[in-house]
Amino acid sequence: MLPSDKRRFGRSGLTVTAMGYGTASVGNLFREIDEATAATMFDTAWDAGIRYFDSAPLYGNGLAEIRTGQALRWKNRDDFVLSSKVGRILTPSPRASIDFSPYVNAAPFQAHFDYSYDATLRSIEDSLQRMALERLEICFIHDVDRYTRGDDQPAVFEEAMAGSARALLRLRDEGVIGAVGLGVNEWEVCYAALERHDFDAFLLAGRYTLLEQEALDKFLPLCRERGAGVVLGGGFNSGILATGAIPGAKYNYGPAPDHVMQRVEQIEEICREHDVPLPAAALQFVMAHPVIASFVAGTRTVAQLQQNIDWFSQAIREEFWAALKSRGLLREDAPVPSA
């Protein structure tokens, strides 16, 4: 499989490349990235044949969208697919008054949540103006999950279903946007939304990885039944499936617990037996499921991005996947890549 391979995105009629480029890092996530490096990241992705780009107002308080527009503005607009998100409105503010965390030296906009109908329409218009591009193909309702909203999540979810969902579904039905849905950290929220509305697009951060396959129980089968497509982010579980079970390895944005470290060590043992890099296995595993159209991995350096591209294309023999299943490290019903 190549990063440039085209995959149908559910029933939407869109096609996206098997590997997408996620722009959170060029919003200065955790550390600052200079303009030249950000531009080179986009160029490297484009030269590898990547034609799906995902952004959001959250990423650097608008900075990632600004840089996305700068990189793509003079490309043929029909040659790439672009997604962004709604749920936050940005307003200009003095830089000193803004808490950018976890972003660094981001754009001078204050972000606040708003999932109302009118704010959703405004958010899309604002995003297009920041990028100076004329359309989005895909739009996700962002962060209506328990990870982000805590105990307020049920009320926030209802607000988003009544406001943002109504606006996006109208725009899709009018042909303004090709696919709409949710971008969240929990498959259960996606499942609840798909039961509620006729969504056709989800960006799921983690929750279907070499370490976690619970989404096979209900969510992914419902997507297949309803013709919904999934973009998978966080396929390294925020670190440990890229680094391995090293001291200080991260799992779901925090220190990896002992049971996760032990499981990854077992997977690494099979990787060594079959001469397979752990990150290559993590990248390619998720793409075997028929509803997953693209893998979007965040990278902070050009070298990281190029390494992901190389891992994506590395040949892995079928015996490797069989070994994971035979030792109970991968669900029997999990689709795996063919050789």
Image (spheres, helix red, strand yellow):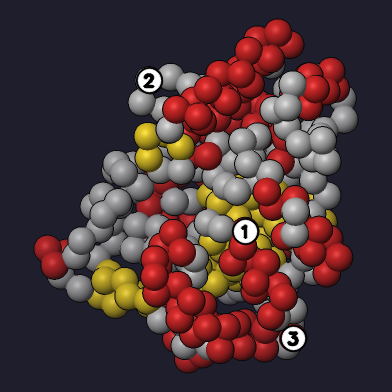
156 versus 190 height, above or below: below
Return the x and y of residue 108 as percentages of the image width and height.
24, 66
Horizontally, is 54 left or right of 272 in the view?
left
Q: Earlier in the sequence, mark 1 or mark 2?
A: 1
Give the foreground label among 2 and 3.
Answer: 2
- Distance from the alpha carbon under mark 1 to that under mark 2: 29 Å
The numbered dot on residue 26 is none
The residue at which mark 1 appears reads as 187
**Which residue is located at x 62 percent, y 58 percent?**
187
Instruction: Name the residue beneath numbered marker 2.
Output: 247
Q: Mark 3, residues whose alpha carbon is within 10 Å: few (<14), some, or many (≥20)?
A: few
Q: Position of residue 223 (x, y in %)?
A: 78, 63
- Disc 2 and disc 3: Cα gap in Å? 50 Å
Q: Which mark is residue 173?
A: 3
Evaluate if marks 1 and 2 touch, with contact meaning CB atoms under 8 Å apart.
no
Q: Residue furthest bottom?
A: 118
